[in-house]
């Protein structure tokens, strides 16, 4: 999955094809991919249980993307086989007055997953270097300072035992139009629609520029960004599930050994 890693002087967000499906071409390719993905979901559930039992590490998953990219559906599908006890999902919307009275990372720190838990951020602290820049609420100088602060913040988290994986769902402007129109046309999805989304859509090119810079400035070896093709959600989910499984397996987790000496062979429940 390294082809989707963000980094390098020549890396450009525009080089990511939103319609990319890797080697899984055609309907047969999709079926093969979906079969592999289901197995990854099962493996992810096994590793999540091991993480929960070990209580030694944490995993933070960041989903950051444009409106209509399917962040909610990704969470629903990828963690379908996982125990709710081991998953914490945090949604970050416009900050409240209380949150605005603190530094911008205050509400983020409070939502971080404890050891043994997979934490999922639906949007994140990256809103504070994305929408804030698109609308000129902060200057480039302030943004540069925040990039440095975010790198230090995430470095501290990894040193304290929380692995971080960050995903940007790369969809096309045309795909976003389809998704937003569906919210308008389908009465069961109108609750998701926000007229402000149409105004933000007009700033698409600026958002792409800010996404690219933010990811390049904050993608590190220990806290990487993945720019994942997002028009085909089945392929997007496959990539992300594989990356998550690889990260958890790399932790080399073990079930804890019960304290004290127990004669397991002769222990009977009566």
Image (spheres, helix red, strand yellow):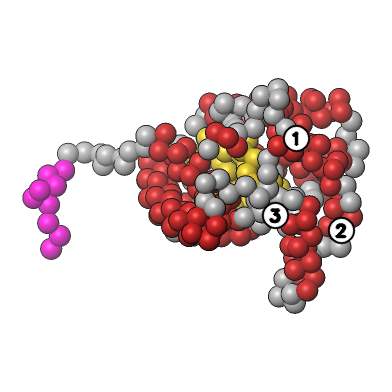
- Which residue position is annotated with label 1? 212
Q: Is residue 2 magenta?
A: no
Measured as percent of width and height from the top left, residue 238 is found at 52, 50
Q: Position of residue 110 (x, y in %)?
A: 64, 43
Which numbered disc covers residue 146?
A: none
Q: Secondary structure at mark 1?
A: helix
* Helix, strand or loop under label 3: loop
Q: Quadrant of the C terminus?
A: bottom left
Disc 3: which residue? 69
Location of residue 139 (image quadrant): top right
- Looking at the rendering, which quadrant does residue 125 occupy? top right
Q: Exactly how many numbered labels are in the figure?
A: 3
- Disc nearer the start of the sequence (1/3): 3
Q: Are marks 1 and 3 in contact (CB under 8 Å)?
A: no
The mark that comes first in sequence, 2 or 1, is 2
Residue at (33, 38) in percent of width and height: 254
Cα–Cα span, label 1 and label 3: 17 Å
Residue occupied by mark 2: 198
Q: Main secondary structure of the magenta part?
A: loop
In the rendered view, would you say 208 is above or below 221?
below
Mark 1 neighbour density, 10 Å: few (under 14) some (14–19) many (20 or more): some
Taking the image as shown, residue 70 lies to the left or right of residue 259, namely right
Residue appearing at x 61%, y 27% in the figure = 220
In the figure, 123 relative to 56: above or below? below
Q: Residue furthest top?
A: 9
Visible residue check, residue 89: yes
Q: Is residue 221 above or below residue 117?
A: above
Query: Which residues are drawn in magenta?
Result: 262-270
Regarding mark 2 in the picture, which secondary structure is present there?
helix
């Amino acid at each position: 999955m390294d082809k989707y890693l963000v980094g390098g002087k020549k890396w450009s967000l525009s080089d990511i094809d939103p319609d990319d499906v890797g080697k899984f071409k055609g309907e047969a390719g999709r079926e093969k991919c979906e079969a592999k993905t289901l197995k990854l979901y099962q493996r992810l559930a096994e590793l999540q249980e091991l993480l929960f039992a070990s209580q030694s590490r944490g995993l933070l998953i960041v989903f950051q993307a444009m409106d209509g990219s399917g962040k909610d559906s990704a969470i629903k599908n990828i963690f379908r086989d996982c125990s709710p006890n081991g998953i914490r999902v945090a949604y970050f919307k416009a900050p409240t007055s209380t949150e605005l009275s603190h530094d911008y990372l205050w509400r983020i720190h409070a939502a971080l997953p404890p050891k043994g838990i997979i934490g999922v951020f639906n949007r994140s602290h990256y809103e504070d270097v994305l929408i804030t820049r698109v609308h000129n609420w902060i200057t480039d100088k302030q943004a540069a300072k925040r990039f440095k602060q975010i790198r230090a913040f995430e470095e501290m988290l990894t040193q304290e035992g929380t692995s971080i994986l960050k995903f940007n769902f790369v969809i096309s402007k045309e795909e976003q139009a389809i998704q937003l129109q569906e919210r308008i046309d389908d009465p069961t999805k109108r609750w998701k629609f926000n007229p402000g989304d149409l105004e933000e859509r007009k700033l698409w090119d600026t958002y792409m520029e800010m996404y690219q810079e933010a990811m390049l400035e904050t993608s590190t070896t220990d806290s990487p960004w993945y720019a994942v093709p997002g028009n085909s959600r089945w392929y997007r989910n496959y990539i992300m599930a594989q990356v998550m499984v690889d990260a958890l397996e790399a932790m080399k987790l073990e079930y804890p050994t019960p304290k004290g000496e127990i004669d397991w062979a002769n222990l009977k429940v009566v």
